[in-house]
Image (spheres, coloured by chain):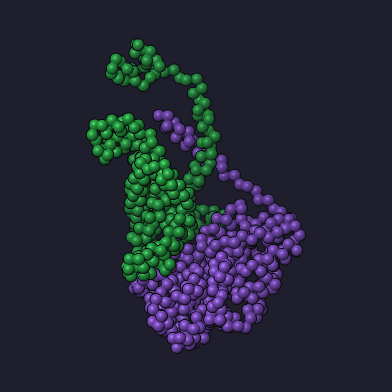
Chain colours: A purple, B green
Amino acid sequence: MRKLAFVAIGAAAALALAGCASGGNAASTSGADKANIRVWFVGTDTPKDAREYLEKTFAKENPGSKIVIEEQSWTGLVDKLTTSLSGSDSPDVVEVGNTQAAAFTSAGAFMDLTSHKKELGGDDLLPGFVEAGSYDGKFYAPPLYSGARLVFYKKDALAAAGLSVPKTLDDYVSNGEALATANPGKSGIWWPGQDWYNALPFIWENGGEIAVQKGGKWVSELGSADSVKGLKEVQEVMTKASAAPKDGQETNPQVGFCDGTTLQLSAPSWVKWSILAAADADTPGCPDQEANLGVYALPGKNGGAAKVFAGGSNIGISAKTKHPELSLSALKIIESKGFQTIYGKNGLVPSLKSLAPTLGTDDVAKAIAAAAANAKLTPASPKWADVEASGVLTDLFVKIAQGGDVESLAKDADKKIDDTLNG
Amino acid sequence: MSSNIVAMDAAPTAIDGERMTAPAPAAKPRRRRPGGFTPYALLVPSLVILIAIVGWPLFQLIIMSFQKFGRAQVFGAPPEFVWFDNYTKILTDPTFWQVVARSLAFAAVCVVLTMVLGTLIALMMMRLGKFFRLLLTVGLLLAWAMPALTATIVWGWIFDTDYGVINNVLVNLFGLTDFTQHSWLINPLSFFLVAAVVVIWGAVPFVAFTVYAGLTQVPDEVLEAAQLDGTSYVQRFRFIIVPYLRSIFVVVIILQVIWDLRVFTQIFALQGIGGIKEQTNVLGTYIYSVSIAGGEYGTGGAIAVIVVILLMAISIYYVRQTIKEEDL
């Protein structure tokens, strides 16, 4: 009986507390006072020079205030941002993947920057990314940088197999298979099953789409005849040209490249720096391969550069920031020519179109320029981030890599994506 | 010595000559002890803390499970009450029942193996010499202290497709060339084999320590007497040790069932390394993928409430069974 009494007391207290605990807390508004501005960069893409430039310039322009950079990981970013941007301990300035931006602009997580658009770069900003950072006619998150996808290859392996840099997508596929046949156990094109970004050019080049908007509803089109044609080519590469794990992730592509089991791979442009990282770095690369490292833009179906996925980031100010003016000052530095030039020099496409020449004139720069000119984005739905996070796409491509029936797998995935996009 | 005095002293048993007798029922109702309210008052602070950190979130969860609660609501849009919509959606979804079945099966296997292995290790510790017992204790403590995420990543490396030590040993030492680039996670059954290894590896130390602590409390005289009567070791374990340790086993099994049913970290991390999420989701990762990754907090909340009810049903049934047996 005594136990029961406890339960009763507990329940009563719980109810009593529940009734009175929803008191709001007044947000304190402070002007241009001195404060630490927390900036979240995601992943290691943003070079050290750029981070230091931001810290120094900000400290000079805002005496007494300081930038605190906190590096986040891409894995689980959407839910991390959801919880931290909505909480009382929100960071001030945050980077978000361009395909994830809509999830937050639509939810009101970012401060409205429409009236500051001109100061942040205006019409010089990358248009596709401005679209990704806008919602309902308002401008929330300017572009941070764009990273084109390039194909990296071993010059000696290509030469030994008597092949040259492919001119069309079909050449690319047949080259990969020829390399794999000539080098048993190695990857002619390294392609782990979870890597769906690289499959998008195959869909787009064959005239397919991921999802299109029809009459106010999203319709997933992976199962359309054109998309399936592209997906079948993906399966061919994954099963015949790649020796990568069928359920592996695309992280650390430099490992296989450096130990010689990967002869070609398609990856964001900054992977060049992972491959060439010093042998004693935290994630070591193989700088001795520099002369042997070739690079080209993925070719399209009819020559030229293929439509590749335009990866990259937007950056916004949290709607809950306690220091909007200081945050805006930090954002202006990030969008300034000085800061963005550092991205260009490191092989990332700067957010300002006028800075494209900073990429340089070497092979990588030419390939980046070619790829960026024809880059495409994922569907512009606020729910797209949920599709990515749900793992539908990684599951689909793991199953394709296993050799499953492409058409029925694509149709199954369509159903799930439709549910999420329209749910 | 009169039995009256014995009853007044409330001794558990009385000795009447050579025979033991049960205590006589108290002659008059026991007086209420002074300060009967104090213990409750002393409990208030901890109760308040418990309610604040456990009760309030649970209450929020239940409310949320009746609402349409998406990412916009997290950022302040008012949620709309949909009452039982979330629940009907889940309970009619075959995916949910697959996940439940998968979780129950996985938890059952893990609990049984963990208990058997843990008990065997505890029994071994009773027989080991001082040095080896210390060595084993340190080893178990290290396994117990290792964070689940770290452990899973290390196990992931061990089972890695390209560079894993298991594949390497199987191919190079045993000549099993089938295991060249064998993916351990792509097949759901094999995925759960790896997951079970990780989970059991992490859970065995707790069971071993707890059971070992219980074993040291089993009186030697009873075991010795039984030995003199010619019982086998299995008989002694079955009829003496198990009854002595019953309450410990109950608590440990309930904890294991709860832990293994809501396992999250190990499965989630393994899904990142390889495998197909859809075929390997358990309750924990399913709630995560629906609510947090998918942005449908209301639906996720409803699943969580259902899981709480499920866990409570299992525990209550088990506790009741055991109390009944003890009463007999």
Most foreground residue, A85 or B43:
B43
Q: Which residue is drawn at 46% across and 78% down?
A: A263
* Residue A108 coordinates in the image, percent (x, y): 58, 60
Residue extending furthest toward the left: B230
Quarter where residue A373 is shown? bottom right
Quarter containing the C terminus of chain B: top left
Q: Is residue B15 above or below residue B80?
A: above
Q: Which residue is drawn at 70% across and 72% down?
A: A338
Q: Can residue A166 be seen in this view?
A: no
Image-based side of A210 in relation to B322, left or right:
right
* Residue B178 coordinates in the image, percent (x, y): 32, 69
The count of marks equals: 0
Q: Is residue A54 visible?
A: yes
Quarter containing the N terminus of chain B: top left
Q: Which residue is drawn at 63% across and 47% down?
A: A25
* Residue A201 coordinates in the image, percent (x, y): 47, 78
Image-based side of B68 in relation to B6, left or right:
right
Most foreground residue, A151 or B120:
B120
Residue extending furthest toward the top: B2
* Residue A302 coordinates in the image, percent (x, y): 47, 87
Q: Which residue is drawn at 66% across and 66% down?
A: A51
